[in-house]
Amino acid sequence: MDANQTLYKLVLGRDNWAECIDDSGAFIFASPAEEFSWNAQRSEVTLGVRLNVFHSAPGNVAPDQSDRRGAAQDRFGNLYWIADSRTELLVNSVGDGVTTHFWSSTDEISAGCRSRYDAFVDCGPPAPSTPLSFSGLAITTEHYLIAGVRNPAGFVVFDLFHGGPPRQVAWPPAIPFAPFAMAAAPDGGVWILDQDNARLWELDRTFAVAVQKPGQAATPAAPPEIFRPADSSPPGRPQIECAPAIAVEMAADLSAIKAIAMAVLPDNSVLLLESSPANPFSSIYRFRSGDQLGEAASLSVAQDLLAPADRAGFTLRGFDLSFIAAEQTPEGARQNITYVVGENGDQAWAFTTAFSTDQLALTPIAEYYPMRMFGGIGLIAGETQVFYDSRDIWAPLVMQKRPRYAESGVIFTQVFDARQPDCVWHRLVMDAAIPGDAVVRIYSRAANDRSHLSVQQWAPEPAPYPRDDGPELPWVTEAAGLSAWELLFQQAVGQYLQLKIAVSGNGKITPRLRALRIYYPRFSYRDHYLPAVYRQDQRSASFVERFLANFEGFYTALEDRIATVQTLLDARSTPAEALAWLANWFGVALDPAWTEAQRRLFLKNAAMFFEARGTVPGLIMALRLALEDCADPSIFQPSANVRAGIRIVERFRTRRLPTGMLEDPQAETGLPIKPQTSMWTPAQGAADLDQRYSAAQQLPPGTQYPISMPSNDGGYAAWTVFSTATLGFIPAAPGGKSSLWPAFLSSRYGVISELNSTYSSSYATFFDVPFPEALPRQAQPLLDWYQFQGILLVGAAAHQFTVYLPLAPGDAQNTNAQRAKMSLAERVIELEKPAHATYEVKFYWAFFRVGDARLGDDTVLDQSSRATQLLLPAVLGDTYTGSTYLARQLPGEPRYRPFLKRSCLAP
């Protein structure tokens, strides 16, 4: 409702737009990508999104499955693949981009029994006369490269981190094995597709065959003894643990499908691509532990994004597929995406992949991925990018921004009810983006009887025009890229109203519609402010009405802003550009690094924050607001900050006082205190302390213990050691102008006469009582001096604190992020702490230390406390002892990496 009591009907969000129908009478989103599409990221309606189809040139030679060999990328970005000859492995180094020879079976043994790795090796058997023939290649998550060998059947394993020659594993001749494709498993193992024998094998992280269906594997054979003396005495060496015997039942049976490619999901289930000439569309199956999960997902869903003319005769048989988890889309969202290359090798198709349930769900993505001269070796899935071989290079699979849309469409809105007959509908405001070559035309029809609405003629309305001052709604900022488009209804009179929106483009662009606001009833300046004579002639009255509507729109916008000025004073509703102005009311300047959400949160709770400013809760509020990624209202709740991620330990809370200072001399009875023989207390008398001191320092008997000693004295060091061990502290004296000593005596005795009676003195005031220069001999003055030392100990630890910051696992190995976090914390503390206080900033790993925190009170046992995986290796001059560890592994090596055991696969 605006300032003139004019209401409006709102169409916003997918649910509202989904109630609209097209010219066929169907809901506009009922058939995907027909005339209109919904952009979920921007919450907008567009013309139907179309996907470009690459039409192969005449004479194009499609890749053949015989061209598939295998390729993979390591963690550093180097690309490995099998050469055309299938007897050689090649590598393309990420550093210089040069392709070089990596390995072949003829490299291993050369003259003098010296290997290509410049190390002498056992000559062993001669090099094979027939080079190994490779098929299938993968690189595991633990940095091993495995390549399948068809003759002799088996595979070779390379340790890419340590280097050295490969380890060749022979497959038992009795078990058919012809590797075709390989894919790394998330647990460090590898999956192998045997297309010839319709089997799917899984190897664990030690490259032993894993049982996919427990209970169906053959009984492991007893491992052979590698050494036994001829006299039948016990073996001289222990038997080596070997992998269990292999049985066909340990693999998944794929005889029911014709799998030609595979990809592994993060949950270690496997996607298998089936392609049959008898079926125009390939299907993708999902297997786990040898069993199929759900039904196969057909690639026919890609037809939903095609133009009607492209659907005739369209087929999508896959050649290869690849999967990337949590890839960031151009709209900013992260999705699991499967890429499938068509059998012609000219185009790849992208599908969002949902596998949270057993049923695999594929949704086509309207992105165009053309491919140039695909050689057919296969797809390589990197961390965030897919590569394909194009002649002699590996090219990234890149989306080409060639948007395509339906050229036109018509939207019929739902029927709007004004709830009053003969209602004059006022105006329409659209939040939309309308490019220059696109057109949006509005038609309306109205009637007092809803049943008569369908027979009314559509009346064309004026073309909408963009508002110069943004949305008509007060203090509302328009979404990026959109404008407010407005028109004044000309003939819409009646209780019920329906709109027809005709949208058109040129096939490459589309209008984007976000919201509609239909205002009613009209507030007429002509009827309210002009005499009746201006309404007598219908033609001239219509002109005056429309003419004055220009002024009505201008002044109503101003009146709305005035009527809703309270919006500016509320941190929840004020526009983003007014937040700094609102902060001026508190006399503060907002941090430019804060997000809009942080600014609003601070202003909403500013009163509570300023009440706590300068205190520990206030400091925690400021630090959490500046450092936490997800700031929420709990920051400003003191009870929630008791166990917040950021911890503050005040120094006085970790002080240690001798037992004697805790005794109350005025109490007749008190808590029992266990006597201590090693620690002196005033009850033992000054003579006892003198005796201990003279004995410890080997001084003549009768030497008195000094309660002060200059630091340049030769016995100062021994005196401090003795005082700490015997008294529990080093005696100190108040400053020359300090009033602590008179205040202490005044609080204890009340009146000076009571002190004179106890001390056998005649002081006039407490300020006349001097601080002892030597150890008092009398019992009560000795106790007063002793317990006053506790006040000095507390004062020495006052106004000091330490801030402990948690560390996110993602920043555990990022020293720059740690320095930035600590620097930001220091800037916040400098602004919020009391001026006289001093502080330190540390990370959690410095928290659990004896003497710095008390067990059960200040200690933190939580993530990033002392977890070694969150600590950095020690760097000379850059880390602190106790907050790091000495690393023995080289950079980049996994901390836990399996040693490959001796394989018993070979007979």
Image (spheres, rainbow, N blue to C red):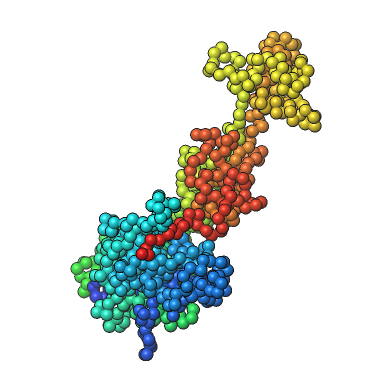
Q: Quadrant of residue 255?
A: bottom left
Instruction: Determine whether, in the image, residue 803 is placed left or right of residue 453.
Output: right
Task: Name the residue at 42% across, 59% down.
Answer: 902
Q: Quadrant of residue 531?
A: bottom left
Task: Name the residue at 52% across, 34% down.
Answer: 855
* Residue 887 sits above or below residue 81 on the image: above
Of 819 and 527, the residue lying toward us:
819
Q: Quadrant of the C terminus?
A: bottom left
Where does the image place residue 579, in percent across and percent down from the top left? 53, 54
Which residue of the protein is positioned furthest toward the left in this rendering? Answer: 451
Of 623 and 71, the residue lying toward us:
71
Task: Name the residue at 43% across, 83% down.
Answer: 373
Task: Name the residue at 50% across, 34% down.
Answer: 856
Q: Is residue 854 visible?
A: yes
Q: Quadrant of residue 776?
A: top right
Where does the image place residue 83, in percent across and percent down from the top left? 45, 78
Of 9 and 88, the residue lying toward us:
88
